[in-house]
Amino acid sequence: MRQKLVAGNWKMHGNLIENQVLLGNLRDSLAGMQNMASAICVPFPYLAQAQSVLAGSVVAWGAQNLSEHAKGAYTGEVSASMLQDFGCRYVIVGHSERRALFGETDEVVAAKFMAAIAAGLIPILCVGETLSEREADAAEAVIARQLDAVLKIAGMAGIARSVLAYEPVWAIGTGKTASPEQAQAVHAFIRQKLAAQDADIANRLVIQYGGSVKAANAAELFSQPDIDGGLIGGASLVADEFIAICKAAQS
Ligand code: PGA
């Protein structure tokens, strides 16, 4: 039985004062949560704050990006081992905003995935199609291509140490959620594709859904057989919403 994971993606939001209140609230409110896992992925400057507030609690923390390089002359970049220094458990890799706005190719995403694994972090690998790709009936082909790039260098052994997040680009921050059936169909596709290589690893893999998840739709999404929690953007900035989403993931 897979345990659901609800991870917040704060994106480029927050400040020291607001974070202190929000993180403290989540730490206290999620303390009794059982049979699910939770995490918050904060901007780099707030990793130390997340570590100091959340250490020893049930809420893990992580980052939203990392360098594919281990160290060196890469001005402005942050390595996997630096994230480890701040106690990160997770790092989001290949978010559609990184792919679309910062030119991350499938190959760069795969290299970042490997860098995370090598440092003992759990990458949350995001895959998903744009609206035009969905309308062209290319969603599965796009997702297969994104997965294949990672499989090529990480293999199923790498996938086994990761979390996947299906995030249809057209549902991110738009208020348009994929219907539970639409999301389930893609999650099943992903699991079957990976099961063809290793059924046991595919069966144990946590595959989150992301894209306008909120308290009002979380339970229905999470009740689908292949949806193992969510990657939460906007609603992770509102304590009551995020807590309610975590409750919906308890099973
Ligand atoms: P959203 O973002 O929940 O605000 O749609 C999800 C994400 O981008 O991870």
Image (spheres, helix red, strand yellow):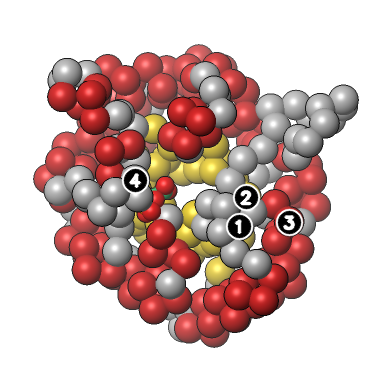
Q: Is residue 249 left or right of residue 179?
A: right
In the rendered image, residue 43, in percent from the top left (x then y), is placed at 64, 54
Quadrant where the C terminus sits is: bottom left
Q: Which three-letter amino acid code belongs to the residue tagged 1?
A: Val
Mark 1, secondary structure of its residue: loop
In the rendered image, residue 5, in percent from the top left (x then y), is placed at 42, 58
Q: Residues within 10 Å of mark 4 (few under 14, many from 20)?
A: many
Q: Residue at x 60, y 75 (%)?
A: 18
Mark with earlier residue (4, 3): 3
Mark 2, secondary structure of its residue: strand
| Disc 4 to disc 2, C-alpha distance | 18 Å
Mark 3, secondary structure of its residue: helix
The residue singled out by tag 3 in the image is 45
| Disc 2 to disc 3, C-alpha distance | 10 Å
| Disc 4 to disc 1, C-alpha distance | 18 Å
Q: Which three-letter amino acid code belongs to the residue tagged 2?
A: Ala
Q: Is residue 221 left or right of residue 76?
A: left
The residue singled out by tag 1 in the image is 42
Would you say the beta carbon of the disc 2 residue lies within 8 angstroms of ligand 1? no
Would you say the beta carbon of the disc 4 residue lies within 8 angstroms of ligand 1? yes
The residue singled out by tag 4 in the image is 172
In the rendered image, residue 140, in percent from the top left (x then y), is placed at 24, 23
Q: Residue at x 48, y 59 (%)?
A: 8
Single out the mark in the foreground, 4 or 1: 4
Q: Are marks 3 and 1 in contact (CB under 8 Å)?
A: no
Q: Is residue 28 visible?
A: yes
